[in-house]
Amino acid sequence: MTNHKLPITNQNITLRVEGLKKYFPVRRGFFQRTAGWIKAVDGIDLDIEPGKTLALVGESGCGKSTVAKVILRLIEPDEGKLIYKGNDIVNLSHKKMKHLRKEMQIVFQDPFGSLNPRMTVGQTIEEGLRGMDLSKRERRDRRDELLEMVGISAISSDRYPHEFSGGQRQRVGVARALSVSPSLIICDEPVSALDVSIQAQIINLLKDLQDRLGLSYLFISHDLNVVGYLSDKVAVMYLGHIMEYANTEELFETPLHPYTLALLSAVPVAEPDKRLELKSLSGDVPSPLDPPPGCKFQGRCPQVEERCREEEIGFARVSEDHLVRCWKVGGR
């Protein structure tokens, strides 16, 4: 099967992204005329199921964080659909979108810059509770419950962010996201700024909260080692495009796209005989301002052929939930 779109394999989804595009203008000259467009996100499809985690992985600059911002409508998409629980939210008014954001929250990468230094952590969490029909005492009780839920003592609610470690601040960020009882949380590189030992603690916390509350996650990361512990499915992104999409176990066992193989070959494994041969990628990532024709990975691919340079390829379906955008796959 060859297609440019990701087939819907499950109708019961929390969020479905269809044909999403986001281009940014490049302006030059005295009059700041548009000289071109940076194709940050160029027609991607994703789906996130209830209580599951979809990981979006790729190198820095591939468009992952732009996807997160567009889903939350912090920036507007140029094309595509964002279907949340059966309703396309692309054209929702700002007022309705503001209300809907209570169901879709984000945990940011930087635990140091994402909290207001002038507010105590208790005030930060209570801010999300003010729109609810709760008394002052009920807000305090809920605040304390959320802090305890993420592993921070409620007596710390009067402390300021600078009094906490990076891992503790990220826990506060998670508590803030939970304060409005969301069903979907976007985790944008939530552990990349933390020490490895602390990363494991935050990943375990996110998994425990998902099991307890039935949360759906979009987990954005450049580190497949982290992704393997938390995600149910993985979408591999390169230069604004999804190159491979599969269940996590299948992706790690039988990666098929040359880019995925290169990423996975750098992941440490407990059994050295099972480690993939290290794949070194030559060349630089092309500019999203002027992406190459054909396959976007052609300039760095060790298996490149002439047709890769000329024809853009859709997905080949390897199994029910495994799709690959490569001419080498599916006998094509």
Image (spheres, rainbow, N blue to C red):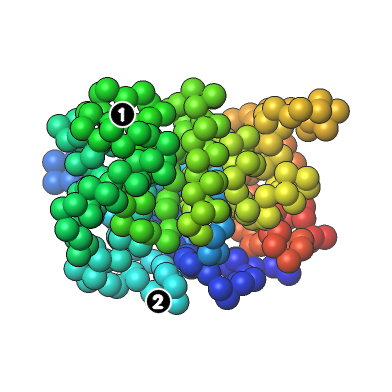
Residue 251 image point, x, y percent = 71, 48
Residue 304 image point, x, y percent = 71, 43
Q: Identify the residue at image location x=23%, y=40%.
A: 122
Q: Quadrant of residue 21?
A: bottom left
* Residue 51 in view here: yes
Q: How busy is the neighbourhood of tag 2: few (under 14 within 10 Å), some, or many (20 plus)?
A: few
Q: Identify the residue at image location x=20%, y=64%.
A: 133
In this view, 194 is above or below 109: above
Q: Quadrant of residue 54?
A: bottom right
Viewer-proximal residue, 79 or 221?
221
Viewer-proximal residue, 199 or 54?
199
Which residue matches tag 1?
A: 112
Which residue matches tag 2?
A: 87
Quarter that holds the C terminus: bottom right
In this view, 328 is above or below 267: below
Residue 59 image point, x, y percent = 52, 37
Q: Secondary structure at mark 1?
A: loop
Question: Seen in the image, is 123 located left or right of residue 86?
Answer: left
Q: How busy is the neighbourhood of tag 1: few (under 14 within 10 Å), some, or many (20 plus)?
A: some
Q: CA distance from mark 1 to mark 2?
A: 35 Å
Name the amino acid, label 2: Asn
